[in-house]
Amino acid sequence: MPTALSTDLYEITMAAGYHVFGSTGHGCFELWVRDLPPEREYLVAAGLDQALEYLEQLHFEPVEIEYLRHLPGLRTVPPSFFDEYLPQFRFSGDVWAVAEGTPIFAGEPLLRVIASLPEAQLVETALLATLLFQTMVATKASRVVDAAAGRPVIEFGARRAHGTDAATLAARAAFIGGCTATSQLECGIRFGVPVSGTMGHSWVLTHEKEEDAFRRYADLYGNDAVLVVDTYDSVAAAHTIVAEGLTPAAIRLDSGDLDRLSREVRRVLDTGGRVGTQIFASGDLDEHRVAALVAAGAPIDGFGVGTSLSTSQDAPSLSGVYKLVEIAREGQLVPTAKRSPRKQTLPGRKQVWRVAHDDVYAHDVLGIADELGPDAGIPLLECVMRQGCRVGVTPPLRELQARCQASVRRLPSGVRALKNPHPYDVRVSESLKALAAARVD
Amino acid sequence: MPTALSTDLYEITMAAGYHVFGSTGHGCFELWVRDLPPEREYLVAAGLDQALEYLEQLHFEPVEIEYLRHLPGLRTVPPSFFDEYLPQFRFSGDVWAVAEGTPIFAGEPLLRVIASLPEAQLVETALLATLLFQTMVATKASRVVDAAAGRPVIEFGARRAHGTDAATLAARAAFIGGCTATSQLECGIRFGVPVSGTMGHSWVLTHEKEEDAFRRYADLYGNDAVLVVDTYDSVAAAHTIVAEGLTPAAIRLDSGDLDRLSREVRRVLDTGGRVGTQIFASGDLDEHRVAALVAAGAPIDGFGVGTSLSTSQDAPSLSGVYKLVEIAREGQLVPTAKRSPRKQTLPGRKQVWRVAHDDVYAHDVLGIADELGPDAGIPLLECVMRQGCRVGVTPPLRELQARCQASVRRLPSGVRALKNPHPYDVRVSESLKALAAARVD
């Protein structure tokens, strides 16, 4: 769980500035992804539940305040900031967000925060880290699951994740993106995600003979056992399984030419009467390798995908930003925006409307929050927090996963393509264009 | 902090198997990186302190045991595992490791664990996630710091890290790798890493005029202020600073052509008598962009590097493995190894000796732990934990950072090259070769 110090120093220097100069009127910030990473034309929103949890519990411990008080960079900040402001600090703003599991596109706000300037500013870093990471992994999972064409994909990436906490959150996001289970237990206990596991090579190595290792594992786990067969020779191991009279639920291939080996192993198992024993494949898989195996017709019943999922290996970050779009001037929130070359932003609080034709998403409209929106457009940003308290309850993860899969199926197929996907049509409303052209701040 | 469930289900199924079949003799596991990522010919070891902390505190909470007891995959495990084994479970093994901040190479063990099989097995996932992530980031930091050629590099990547916990650990690892500070406060309070910060664009946007934003910030932070100048136009902002009579410690450029802008802004500041105001650059920097700016002679005094550091963007994972290399047979530990095609491993517990000539590292020897080692070779693996208790104290981070920088300076310059680096000479000892050829397991 993030702490109050899970933020950048400059968020505090700015917050102190707002406090000192009495700039505690409201501001509106939006969080979005500027550009999609290579080979992606959609993202799957995820991480909102953790973001809201963070906002709800956000407070400064006395030891954290003392740490800040003694920082050289804050030595000119008046004591009232440390003695009065920080001890009572809570997040009391309003938050609007796109539901987890929803496909979104570049430039579309995932989250909108309306709060006093110091509050809205302080939460920037943790909100970005929380939402971008899970969104990135859910997106990757959606691609891998798409590639598997109905075969189960299990998230196996804990060991290569960016620490153990990232492993847990990656497994959660991967489940939203469509994985059927994770190997990581902390995600199981914390989020109720189904857990699944096989057997490691070390189990085989600790026995003098592979057949002893298999027999013992099957003695304990019966027909639930999944036996890893590539410690020495995968095909020979399949023969061993048959010869030993074992009927494992599945075997796991973890190295070598998975297409060829899966066919050979399938033949050995079938000839030996083990038609019910499934073949599970793992070992440096990603959406492209999974798609190639599926296209080749390899007799693989499920995939374990690790590093490429838990780190979103080919796109390990999203160009997410959190920008001020409205600021209080004379008691009223008015649009504002950054105008740096190549980093321009659209002013004002926004809404995204999704328009479908015949059950396929046709285009989105990015407009001003209080404009009417297109006919039959479904608004994506909903109020999820009012004055620091959550509105409604978070749906169970299975529901988010189902929503994600249903929504991804409604994307035009070109947008979902694993290679050279087509951009989705996101239109800026005339009102928003006019506002962007007109603002004089 | 990792919990007992920060692991994969199969570590528990195997541990239960060892328990049930009384295979609780010792095993020796080693953790190493198989292949270095592209453009890397060395790694900087990091994360050991967190790995040892994890091993020291590892235990199962009753609620975790109840969770495991009710998992479908463990339903055939006898109650004694849940009622007797897990409640008293502690890590009581011996650990040898390479000190944090030490350069290491492919195939060299970072860590060796000797413990009862279930103990050694259970900790695999968390040890890999903990050590690989920080090692990867420390390595990236070492490259960026090398590129900056003496100019300070500050870690700015919290917002794009894989969650807030990854942000804290990345900042720690980046400091070991040579960064002078981080923007992330949690890393400051937890690990004593110096924190540093500037000002965000939103501060400027909340004021009607840029000059008001600058003046107010300078009113509060005096000559410590670092003003971000690219909200509208970086050069115009530099003129504003001079015209307003401000003397900030530095200005920050965050977008545009940093080479050109730094020269123009330097000229404006110098002409205005602000020779003491430094120029700090940020915005999607990595080691290659930093090196190009340094080579071009851009008048930049320091760099803020974010995403590319905190996610090790071009190499966001390491191919780290944790493999059984010795197993108890008739009361004695004997060498063993996995022999899968393309994933073969060297058997037996190992040591790495580093040999220097004239203060430059010449080669390493990877040998059997108890062989004599080469003349003047310094062994890298040291005992850091005995029977579950730490041996010695962890040096302060500044010492690890100094060790890292001194050691990286001793690498042959080709090994440190940012592009097309040369491989370092790692030799396998004759004894280890003979053991690998001879083993009959």
Image: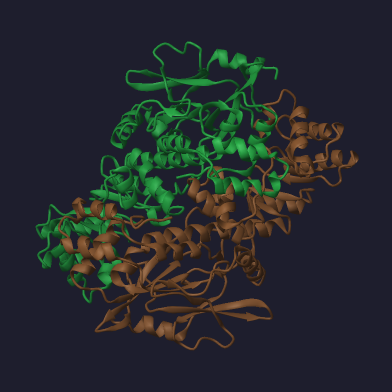
Chain colours: A green, B brown
Q: In this view, does A149 lie above or below A154?
A: above
Q: Position of residue B333 (x, y in %)?
A: 32, 82
Asked whether residue B216 is in view, the answer is yes
Asked whether residue A339 is in view, the answer is no
Q: Quadrant of the C terminus of chain B?
A: bottom left
Q: Residue at x 61, y 29 (%)?
A: A117
Q: Which residue is drawn at 57% across and 32% down?
A: A119
Q: Which residue is drawn at 44% across and 46% down?
A: A312
Count of numbered tags: 0
Q: Where is residue B125 in the image (x, y as percent from the top left)?
A: 37, 60
- Relative to residue B224, is residue A363 drawn left or right? left
Quarter of the image holding residue A60?
A: top right
Q: Which of A63 and B243 is in front in this view?
A: A63
Q: Nearer the viewer, residue A439 or B365?
A: A439
Q: In this view, does B312 lie above or below B352?
A: above
Q: Where is residue B328 in the image (x, y as percent from the top left)?
A: 28, 79
Q: In which quarter of the image is the N terminus of chain B?
A: bottom left
- Relative to residue B290, is residue B123 drawn left or right? left
- Relative to residue B392, is residue B280 drawn left or right? right
Q: Position of residue B29 (x, y in %)?
A: 37, 72
